[in-house]
Image (cartoon, grey):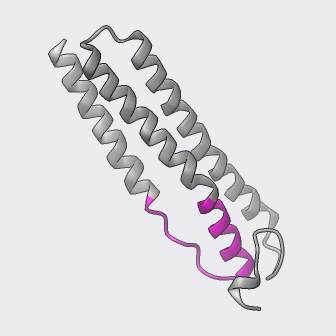
Amino acid sequence: MDREEITPHSGGSEPDYRFTLANERTFLAWLRTALGLLAGGVAVHQLVPAPAAASAVLAGLCVALAAVLAATAYPRWRRVQIAMRAGQPLPRSRMILVLTGGLLTLTVAAAVLLVVS
């Protein structure tokens, strides 16, 4: 069966349910992380009394990273599910690098905000 004919819910061979559930838990973890970043962005915007421009930048970075994570969570879940059904190696994800870089940027921005205020 060609890879194009395999969908996350049909085609190929049925993967072990534990792997399917682990893939789903990973998807939900990405969404929880995005939700946490979104909440952090709202909290920074509403509660940080530092210069308005600096807190707006920090809040914007949180919200932007949350949007990227939320937007890429489902496509990643889908690629992994299809690879499991096709019996192929799991695809690599660059989102770990993006998340790490984004959190490093947020940390540096928060440190600068603390020093400035």
Front one among 63 and 28 = 63
Instruction: Identify which residue is drawn at 59% across, 53% down.
Output: 73
Q: Is residue 2 above or below residue 43?
A: below
- Quadrant of res 79: bottom right
Q: Which residues are magenta?
A: 75-94
For the N terminus, give its image quadrant.
bottom right
The percent coordinates of residue 113 (x first, y second) are 23, 21
- In-image side of 94 versus 53 (left or right): right
Give yes or no for residue 81 being in the magenta stretch: yes
The percent coordinates of residue 49 (x first, y second) are 31, 8
Q: Residue furthest bottom?
A: 1
By secondary structure, the bulk of the magenta-drawn segment is best described as helix
For the C terminus, give its image quadrant.
top left
- In-image side of 106 versus 67 (left or right): left
Q: Residue furthest left?
A: 116
Instruction: Identify which residue is drawn at 52% across, 25% down.
Output: 39
Give yes or no for residue 79 being in the magenta stretch: yes
Instruction: Identify which residue is drawn at 49% across, 39% down.
Output: 66
Q: Is residue 66 above or below residue 79?
A: above
